[in-house]
């Protein structure tokens, strides 16, 4: 079905899934671009994703001042509210009734793979229902696990938070010794956990060990690894993904007493509990005899901490939002806007429209070249990949520590 | 015993207790001041507090470049390493042997109330042993619970971290709803937990409830409070001190299965575990039927996150370090440098020498005027007190949310 080059109508935009530090950049990028095009009459925002369409809780984004738009772009979390809901065919029928009532012909949905699936479902159902709609997904996720994307908006800023946390926490561990475990978000993809490696500036800096969901987790090997580092340095800093699972695929967190809660996309709750860190800390205490063992779970701070944003990430997030609108206006009917890295030594990206289906549902994992042979660290290839996305980190000062000759 | 106006000799400085974001400012403040005075010959740092004196692991701080000193000042955690150790009389005897060997006549110890106690013990033992020593404590603690001090270096930056975390987390909670509990450090003093209130910019902003160790914690009342906020707003953000205890003084964290670990000053481990958050989240789920309940424990990030420093805090931390050296040089024999707030509307402080004993061991708590009647929030008086110390916070942008008329 060939789409008309231009269609006139109103635009609706919404946000879905977990917030990020820059998801509002994408929202504002789309809104600011839309304001340039006469084909787009009104610009509406639905509160709490598709829930807001079903409930008809729409707001008029043309009533917001430029100053507000700019301030919202620089504010973490999802300014339109979010939701985790997969639409049924009945939901879609109800959604089209609302879209038609408000003459909405441009629809933009900002989110991760579940939100891409939602956009894909709406697009397919719109075709069946012969409802004329330009239907676009705008990528985001701190997990960095969307297919088709070199990386996703939100990852850079979350990675910066994780790196800055490890920079400080490594020094804290230098000061007081012992073993420190930090649990990082990222359900099935280890990118964010791996970003901890960017904290290292010297050979002995932590994280000394990194455990990713891409490799089966063995408690026996973990204890051995930790003991080896602690024997050598008198301390050990460890980055662990919340999603680590054993050889059979059983999440390690379920070995404890953590309650299992599942959302409508079938995801088990991994965040918002300190259980995994506590399980691992207890194992180390029990099996190694090391007395000072601490665990922190970075939790929601990773995705919404105010005041920790990668400039590159913010710029790119704005760019994918603006690009989605440009693509819709230029005659393309649907798609997801993906970030592609240009070849060459200098870091550069471009935003490309890719099929909705190619981003929906399934996720991508850390490629093998980013993980070391023992499965307990990352490679230099990962550092080279992630450093430009995470951007500038604080400068760390260290003494030379010139010893005073013993008397 | 009247001290000589000036004594010549070497200086030793060390850090103790939990690191902070600005404890190195105090260290460098003292070192830079010491470099100005000819009475002080060499400037040594002991690694890991008094342990480094006992082990004779001293470093020569005059061998560090100005650039390094400045970079270290701006780096979180304790650059000389830290320790939690209370000296016995035997330790003191051993310490004086080392001090004498290296002709150390100026001793500075940066830390909290336990470190003030250590400094006091060393000072008293030095008098008994007739070992001539200028002996000073330089205050720091994110807990903000040192007696004699209006506030302590480290609190402002940790408070800034907590406030920024709540600014983002409140928006995250707006986006996805439900109940969010954040556990904050502060053993018996609620100042840092209370700093979460600085995140609020509008009436409905979280934290909506704040639980401090200064008031007995009732699980029944807690559930009631949370339900009331959730019924009204459809969400609830809560700040909880790690140190909350019931009417009998039993820490709530010990109601779970968390292992109890005690340091040489007799403190139970409260940090480095997610147990308290998980206990409270489970109670809310069980007793209210609210399904989305999450808990994060901010943990060590509060005291050592790289790149989150209150400028006021950094400046004052440097000031107390420099003041300790000035006081020692000017003929005073011992003391702790405390921060006093000057009266008047405009925020201003001065650094005063106070007796070691008056800061040692015991801590101070949140005054009653800072806590609301129900014991589940702070007052405006607290906000007025803490805001200038925490300093500038990121700007948050919010939509006006002009509704589109329903059709």
Image (cartoon, coloured by chain):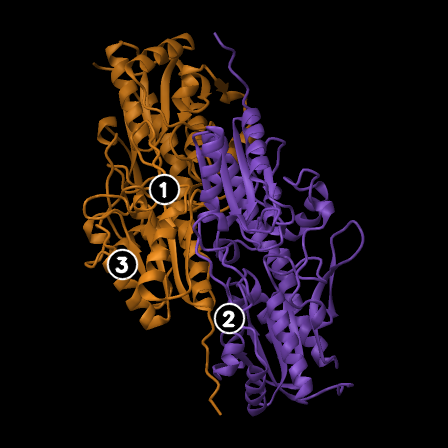
Chain colours: A orange, B purple
* Residue placed most toward the observer, A39 or A363: A363
Which residue is identified by label 3?
A222
Residue B226 located left or right of residue A327: right
Element at label 3: helix
Q: Is residue B88 above or below residue A141?
A: below
For disc 2, the chain is B
Label 1, label 3: how far apart the Cα atoms are: 21 Å
> Which of marks 3 and 1 precedes in the sequence?
3
Whole-number angstrom distance, CA of label 2 to CA of label 1: 34 Å
x, y percentage for residue B251? 55, 51
Q: In this figure, which residue is indicated by the disc labeled 1?
A: A258
Circle 2 residue? B83
Residue at position x 68%, y 51% from top?
B366
Residue shown at 26% from the left, 64% from the top:
A224
Nearer the observer: mark 2 or 1; the answer is 1
**Are labels 1 and 3 assigned to the same chain?**
yes
For mark 3, name the chain: A
Where is residue B313, by image quadrant? bottom right
């Amino acid at each position: 079905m060939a789409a008309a080059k231009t269609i006139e109508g109103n635009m609706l935009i919404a946000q879905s899934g977990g917030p990020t530090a820059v998801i509002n950049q994408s929202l504002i990028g789309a809104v600011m671009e839309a304001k340039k095009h006469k084909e787009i009459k009104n610009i509406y925002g639905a509160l709490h994703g598709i829930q807001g369409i079903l409930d008809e809780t729409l707001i008029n984004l043309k009533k917001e001042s430029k100053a507000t738009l700019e301030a919202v772009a620089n504010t973490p979390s999802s300014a339109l509210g979010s939701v985790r809901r997969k639409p049924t065919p009945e939901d879609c029928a109800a959604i089209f009734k609302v879209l038609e009532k408000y003459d909405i012909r441009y629809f933009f949905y900002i989110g991760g793979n579940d939100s891409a699936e939602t956009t894909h479902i709406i697009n397919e159902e719109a075709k069946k229902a012969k409802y004329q709609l330009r239907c676009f997904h705008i990528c985001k996720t701190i997990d960095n696990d969307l297919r088709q994307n070199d990386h996703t908006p939100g990852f850079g800023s979350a990675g910066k938070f994780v790196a800055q946390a490890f920079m400080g926490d490594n020094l804290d561990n230098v000061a007081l010794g012992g073993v420190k475990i930090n649990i990082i978000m990222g359900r099935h993809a280890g990118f964010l956990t791996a970003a901890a490696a960017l904290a290292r500036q010297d050979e002995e800096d932590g994280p000394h060990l990194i455990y990713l969901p891409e490799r089966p987790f063995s408690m026996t090997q973990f204890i051995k690894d930790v003991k080896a580092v602690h024997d050598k340095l008198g301390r050990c800093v460890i980055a662990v993904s919340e999603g680590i699972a054993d050889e059979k695929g059983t999440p390690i967190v379920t070995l404890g007493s953590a309650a299992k809660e599942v959302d409508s996309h079938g995801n088990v709750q991994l965040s918002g509990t300190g259980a995994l860190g506590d399980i691992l800390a207890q194992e180390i205490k029990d099996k190694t005899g090391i007395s000072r063992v601490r665990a922190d779970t970075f939790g929601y701070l990773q995705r919404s901490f105010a005041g920790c944003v990668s400039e590159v990430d913010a710029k790119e997030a704005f760019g994918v939002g603006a690009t989605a609108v440009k693509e819709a206006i230029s005659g393309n009917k649907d798609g997801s806007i993906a970030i592609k890295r240009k070849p060459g030594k200098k870091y550069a990206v471009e935003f490309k429209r890719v099929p909705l289906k190619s981003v929906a549902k399934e996720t991508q994992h850390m490629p093998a070249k980013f993980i070391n042979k023992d499965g307990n660290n990352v490679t230099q290839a990962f550092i080279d990949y992630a450093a430009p996305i995470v951007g500038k980190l604080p400068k760390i000062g260290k003494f030379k520590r010139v010893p005073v000759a013993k008397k």
